[in-house]
């Protein structure tokens, strides 16, 4: 495929993504991450994820239980709800508006 055929798609995709909205959701994710886990727990979670290489079966049973506990403590449903709320409010706040 030539570069001329791909370029318009890239431009359309860039315009379609409201970057301020992405930043708002990322900020909400950081807030949630730091509010739910202590610094020690965050470091341990990252360590377990790196060690597993994305495959929990590479961890010991004890490490798997610890990983499950830390992920459960993150309460990802609450984060998803907050991120969705941020996205809806952000869309209204940063949207294109009428007549543009």
Image (cartoon, rainbow, N blue to C red):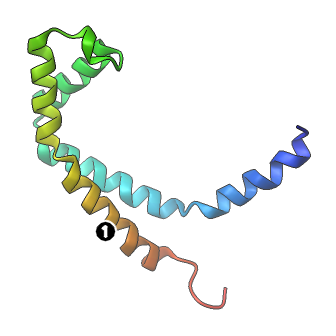
Residue 88 drawn above or below residue 29: below
At 49% across and 74% down in the image, what residue appears?
94
* Quadrant (top left/top right/bottom left/bottom right) for the N terminus: top right
Mark 1 highlights which residue?
85
Left or right placement of residue 94 versus residue 74 in this view: right
Whole-percent x and y of residue 5?
A: 88, 48
Whole-percent x and y of residue 45?
A: 20, 26
- The quadrant where residue 61 appears: top left
At 32% across and 17% down in the image, what residue appears?
55
Residue 59 drawn above or below residue 96: above
Element type at marker 1?
Answer: helix
* Quadrant (top left/top right/bottom left/bottom right) for the C terminus: bottom right
- The quadrant where residue 36 appears: top left
Alpha-carbon neighbours of circle 1 within 10 Å: few (<14), some, or many (≥20)? few
Residue 30 drawn above or below residue 16: above
Whole-percent x and y of residue 27?
A: 33, 54
């Amino acid at each position: 495929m030539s570069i001329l055929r791909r370029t318009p798609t890239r431009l359309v995709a860039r315009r379609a993504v409201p970057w301020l909205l992405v930043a708002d959701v990322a900020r909400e994710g950081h807030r949630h991450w730091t509010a739910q886990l202590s610094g020690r727990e965050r470091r341990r979670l990252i360590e377990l994820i790196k060690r597993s290489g994305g495959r929990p079966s590479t961890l010991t049973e004890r490490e798997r239980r610890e990983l499950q506990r830390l992920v459960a403590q993150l309460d990802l449903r609450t984060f998803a709800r907050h991120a969705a709320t941020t996205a809806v409010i952000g869309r209204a706040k940063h949207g294109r508006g009428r007549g543009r």
